[in-house]
Image (cartoon, rainbow, N blue to C red):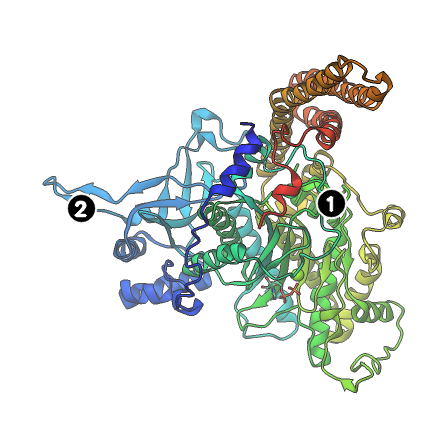
Amino acid sequence: MITREKALSEIAERSESLVGYGKATKMASPAEVFGLNVFSDVAMRKFLPYSVYQRLKSVIRLGGKIDEQLAEEVSHGVKEWAISKGATHYTHWFQPMTGLTAEKHDSFIGFDKEGIPIDRFSGKNLSQGEPDASSFPSGGIRATFEARGYTAWDPTSPIFLMEHATGATLCIPTIFLSYTGEALDKKTPLLRSMEVLNKAALRVLKIFGNTTATRVYSTVGPEQEYFLIDRSYYNRRPDLLLTGRTLFGASSPKGQQMEDHYFGSIRERIIAFMQDVDMELYKLGIPAKTRHNEVAPAQFEIAPIFEDSNVANDHNQLVMETLKKIAFRHNLALLIHEKPFAGINGSGKHNNWSLSDSDGNNLLEPGKTPHENLQFLTFLTAIVEGVYQYADLLRASIASAGNDHRLGANEAPPAIISVFLGEQLTKILDSLEHNKKMDYSDKQIIDLGLGKLPVINKDVTDRNRTSPFAFTGNKFEFRAVGSSQSIAPANYTINTIVAHMLNEFADKIEVNLKEGMDLNKAVMEVVIPSIKKSKPIRFEGNNYDPEWEKEAEKRGLPNKKNTPDALKDLISKKDKDIFIKLGVLSERELESRYHIYVEQYSKLVNIEAETALTIAKTMVLPAVLRYQDTIASSINSIQSVKGFKAELAGKQLELLNKYSTLINELHNSIEALENRLNEVKGISDSEKQAEGYCKIILPLMNELRSVVDSLEEITDDDLWPLPKYREMLFIY
Ligand code: ADP
Ligand code: MG
């Protein structure tokens, strides 16, 4: 049986015994299960003495150190809680530079002096761990002889339990550092960036006379896109298994052209999966809010309610892991790659970002009074100028081999970073720039011809879906983040840029105030030049339009179409300086990150190329030779029939020739890719090597793909080994 046939028959034979099908059992409500597997306030109050609870909460709220004694007292309560829920092991849960999460489990088992078994979990176990760090990417920070790194408890993200079929593991969110104190993970710079942003934003709030806010934090709500396909297909596609994307596959006659999937009714098999996912997330305290079909067939989205960026980042990691885990239960496979299928939409992560103060005010919410609006305008223009000055850093923060298939390829958002503000704000900024009086009269009311509909903030509906960085009423939506990426780098980059700009604004405004200007003038003297300066980054038009690329070039905006190019900005002097100055990342940390990303890029493309070669040689070639033989034999056999008119074999001969030409091209493509791959593998300079993978290997892989896809289109369907697009995308 050929590979693909196995998948097809497996699916046909599988009895779909979906959990709860047709039963509609009464389930617990979201609120009832929410946070059940989290060491939440409720659990803390139950398992910790009140004074301990208060001390811990104060550290969480105001920052500060957890001393040994407090850690000891908290660890006892955590252990009792975890064991009461069936946990047997604990782990420090961290986010190394792989972009994934890491865990190393330790059992609670221990023995006292008399040799009696006891469940043990100390303050030290809670607050510090020592995973063998030598096998995580460190970009040269940690030579193997000093392999030890350590993990340290991050009390600002809740402790949780990871359930599995036969038990549960206690997970402590941690940062991951080298013994010299350098960050080996993605969470540490995120926490640092939140701290500097807090300080800078509080400074600005003080200028506006705010005396009550004690903290400002960035909030994030990441909308996560993903694909689902049947597991049997997935298992029979080495490319999906090893690289997360299809390296081959002729397009399906039906793709997304009917536009019938987006927000379409969700099929029963999928809704069963989504339901399972949501309930699992509620238990983990993750506020999953929205679920729907996306644009491409088999593509979906899940969006949570926003949280502070540290917790949102941890939760997004858990969302990705939960989607994957639950998909398995439902005989589905999760494809979280940015471009799993050629020719149809890829997946991103819309990173909604805003600022909130400790009194619960969204600082990007336009105000009601002129004073509030002045403050709003200050934050807004600082952000816009930040994006203008550091567009290249934002681009670098989301650079990856997978994301290159969206950004700067044939899909949006483009690799050019620009800001969309909407009509209303654009008018406001333009009139400030030109010192004109605003005409507000037409803006307050939207006339629908059916009577007047007041109180609609027009910008909320006035969306530009093509913009990579769009203001959406009371937050910015950074839409260029890749679906499989950790959101930490994007967010620590935004936080750092904004902190830097707010500090610059505050410096200047404070000087103006000292010189005796009133607040309004002191602020406007800073805001208006900033509006003028950063104007080139503002773009309200269609970002997919090829004209935009030319226009952006005229405006001097960077347009880095691939990862090796985009990454270079991470180590340019101007860009390094703000990270170093604010203490978010040191020079060494930045350099090491750069090396890690460059290497990761090369390794990934290398795996893709090797996988493509394996499939071409061991699956495609044998299949097409068989079909070639069928055509040839058929010609031979009809021609041996007495009285057969020879000219009637003409079309078949044509087919044979065409087919054999393609097979020849296949041989050549394989050979070319193999040879050049060996060359590129041998390049010792890592930057040059990455460029080789980008400029030489990827184009050759595309050539190979196009030959294979042409063969797929005319090869006997029964012989084709790989599950096809039309099957994978439309199975439900
Ligand atoms: P959309 O029309 O884009 O779906 P929504 O208002 O539903 O707009 O929000 C989408 C995402 O934005 C959600 O994940 C939500 O949590 C997030 N979001 C809303 N407000 C904020 C905020 N103040 N800060 C960060 N994220 C936010
Ligand atoms: Mg959105």
Closer-to-camera residue (264/490)? 264
Q: CA distance from mark 2 to mark 1?
A: 55 Å
- 84 sits left or right of 442 in the view: left
Q: Residue furthest front?
A: 643
Mark 1 is surrounded, within 10 Å at the Cα level, by few (under 14), some (14 to 19) or many (20 or more) other residues, namely: many
Can I make out residue 349 in this image?
Answer: yes
Tell me residue 162's x, y (percent): 38, 50
Q: Amino acid at mark 1?
A: Asp
**Relative to the observer, which residue lies in front, 41 or 727?**
727
Q: Earlier in the sequence, mark 2 or mark 1?
A: 2
Residue shown at 60% from the left, 74% from the top: 210
Compared to residue 211, the image places residue 16 above or below, namely above
> Image quarter for residue 717?
top right
Q: Residue at x 63, y 75 (%)?
A: 209
> Tag on residue 118?
2
Q: Is residue 310 visible?
A: no
Q: Residue at x 34, y 53 (%)?
A: 67
**Which circle, 2 or 1, is nearer the viewer?**
2
What residue sits right under mark 1 in the picture?
A: 392
Amino acid type of the residue tagged 2 in the rendering = Ile
Label 1: state its secondary structure.
helix
Rendering coords of residue 116 (x, y %): 12, 42
Helix, strand or loop at disc 2? Answer: strand
Residue 66, percent across and down? 37, 55
Q: Ligand 1 shows up in which quadrant of the image?
A: bottom right
Q: Residues within 10 Å of mark 2 (few under 14, many from 20)?
A: few
Residue 118, given in percent of the width and then of the height, sits at 18, 46
